[in-house]
Every structure is written in C-alpha cells, then in structure tokens.
Amino acid sequence: MEDLSTTGAKISFKGNLKYQFKESRIISDCQMMLPDESNIDARIKVLGFVYNQAKDISHIRCQFLEMSDDSALAIKDLIDQALKNVATESSVA
C-alpha cells in the first residue's frame, strides 16, 4: 500500500495486472491487509491504473464505496496514529 485515506488507497502489485484492474471496475469483495496487519473488507471502485514496465509493478488507485464500521475505524485509527507520529517527529527535530 502506497497511500491510504478514509476515502481510498493507492496500491502496488508486482507484475502487469492491466486486465484484472480495468478503470471503473467495481470489486465487491476486496480484502486488504493494512500496514499494522489488520484486515479490512470493502467494496471498491478502480479509479486508475498505471503499469511501470521498467520495475514490473502495477499501481492501482481505488475509491472505497462500502465497508464495515470496523474497517472504517481501523483505517481512521491507522491514519490518526501516523499523523501523531509525524507530529511527534516534527516537534523533536
């Protein structure tokens, strides 16, 4: 996972996934593992796809359409903790 917000994410995968992740495709049963190793289940819409041929990596931007309250809370908690860590590091420097 490259980027995460309460409304969506940017995710990278090894290989060319052009045919699996077409723009505007709705994925009803998407499960993602967050950096803290918690899982979220969501319905997502693929907003964009870029394949980096030199690195053999696919970058997918997606929007969360539906998710459980627990999944939404897990994302919010993860973002809040990351922001708190950044603020702490800034005040130390």
Image (cartoon, helix red, strand yellow):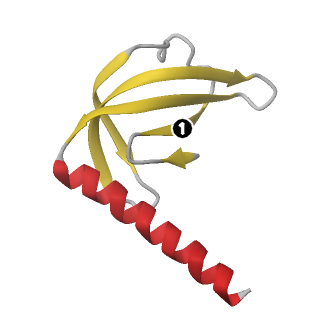
Who's the residue at 51% across and 68% down the image?
A: 83
Quarter occupied by residue 58: top right
Residue 37 in picture, x, y percent from top left: 39, 60
Q: Is residue 33 left or right of residue 92?
A: left
Q: Residue furthest right?
A: 54
Q: Is residue 38 visible?
A: no
Q: Is residue 53 visible?
A: yes
Q: Residue furthest bottom?
A: 92
Residue 22 in picture, x, y percent from top left: 49, 12
- Give the answer, above or below, for where 1 lies relative to 79: above
Residue 50 in picture, x, y percent from top left: 65, 22
- Give the answer, above or below, for where 18 lies relative to 71: above
- Give the answer, above or below, for where 34 lies relative to 59: below
Q: Residues within 10 Å of mark 1 (few under 14, many from 20)?
A: some
Q: Is residue 61 left or right of residue 64?
A: right
Query: What residue is pinned by disc 1?
Result: 10
Who's the residue at 53% across and 38% down the image?
A: 11
Query: Which quarter of the rendered picture does the C terminus lie within?
Result: bottom right
60 and 7: which one is in front? 7
Mark 1: secondary structure: strand
Q: Amino acid at mark 1?
A: Lys
